[in-house]
Amino acid sequence: MAAYSAALSETEHAREPGTVPIDPQKTYELSELIDIAQRTNPETRVAWERARQAAIAIGLAEGTYYPALAAAATGAVAHVPLPIPTTVVPGGVFTADTQFVIPTLSLEWVLLDFGRRRALVDAARALTMEATAGFNATHQQVVFGVTREFHALTAVRGKVAAARAALAAARSLEDAAAARKQNGLATLPEVLQAQEETARATYDLEDAIAAEHDARMALLETIGIRPGTPIEIADTSQQPLPPALEESVDEAIDRTLTQRPDLIARLANVRAKEAEVRRARADYWPRLAARTAVAGNIGELKVENSPYQGVHELQYDAGFRFEWSLFEGFERRNKVHLAESMQQEAEDELEHAKDKAVREVWKAYDDTKVALVKHQAAAALLAASEKSWAATLESYQHGLATFPDVRESERNLARARTLAQAARAEVLTRAAAFAFSTGDLARP
């Protein structure tokens, strides 16, 4: 319960419905966008309520350890005709009239139940752990969704920057072609082709800006913010990437098996099923309870035409109640078999989930490693393309390179910039997917 309470207290704001005020003058980082999503996402609030309900269920289960105290009162008016031999009463009918009230206060306390209540409490606590893990899993889904869309927006912003650089390069080529034509070193088709390159780069820039708008709308939708809300989102497209993975995949798998919310939920489900088996087996044994009751007999009675005779006395009893069901049509045996089957099912699901988690971590780990290598290669390609473009453009300006050479160099540079931004975005996305697969995103 301590871990559960800590988990809920850390994220209590997630249960508060309603919108979050957005400051249009503030630039929001990824962590702040995640915080907004956690407070506005309805799935988070639903998971929170389920966790609260599971915690309340523990109190209900623990309440079975306490004695049951009940108060009751019975009041009635009765007219009772009884048959009697005619030799005693002429007519053969004996009548009695009574009016009474019997208030009762009873107490019963189960002393021995051979583990029924203990199993009930253990099952409730296991279900609470499962609900808490479900809350953390929902939290992780929200974090990953926002992170993925944020990096998608970052990638598109990188493409916009690459498109702007490509447009600047195309304009440089156009200026160089126009200058060469003025000096009689270039033909009109060269100038027109350079203008075509500028027009193509302008179109690519506008297309990238439109894609940035779409990515922004997708991010706002994932967060839970209306599309028209004025909000500034930090541009991290030029920030350095996180360091390369230093841990081994085996270390990542070991951490995954101890912290992934879905695996914790599966394990908690197994514990709950084990408790159900113990409870089903405990039904074979008797129950022993202590009970006592105190009541008042308040009323009056008359027989035939006699006057009423009143009573106002205290009555009480105390003792033990022993209950043992000896045969019920094999119901208990079938309940045990059913509980054992459900336990085996939960254990098989846990093993399957573990195998699936290991495969996911392996793939995410390899994907992250490959993305880092691709980014290094793309960065090297971009550096080489920039040098090639600068050298080719200078050569063209001095009449040492042809227009097809410089145009091809300009296009290669644009492709290299696009590949570099795509590789950078892939590193960020793969790293987020790796953290999601290991359960790191669910940690505070």
Image: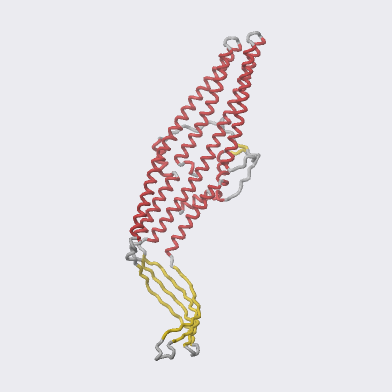
User: x and y percent of residue 442 in the render?
Assistant: 48, 43
Looking at the image, what colour scheme do you see?
Answer: secondary structure
State how many labels appear.
0
Seen in the picture, residue 46 relative to 426 is either above or below; the reply is below
Indicate the quadrant where residue 21 lies: top right
Residue farthest right in this picture: 182
Seen in the picture, residue 375 relative to 219 is either above or below; the reply is above
Residue drawn 53% across the image and 37% down it: 148
The foreground one among 395 and 60 is: 60
Seen in the picture, residue 250 relative to 272 is either above or below; the reply is above
Residue farthest top in this picture: 184
User: x and y percent of residue 184 in the render?
Assistant: 65, 8
Residue drawn 60% across the image and 42% down it: 225
Q: Is residue 67 left or right of residue 399?
A: left
Residue drawn 52% across the image and 30% down it: 424
Seen in the picture, residue 420 relative to 28 is either above or below; the reply is above
User: x and y percent of residue 79 in the render?
Assistant: 48, 82
Q: Is residue 390 left or right of residue 85?
A: right
User: x and y percent of residue 108 in the render?
Assistant: 42, 70
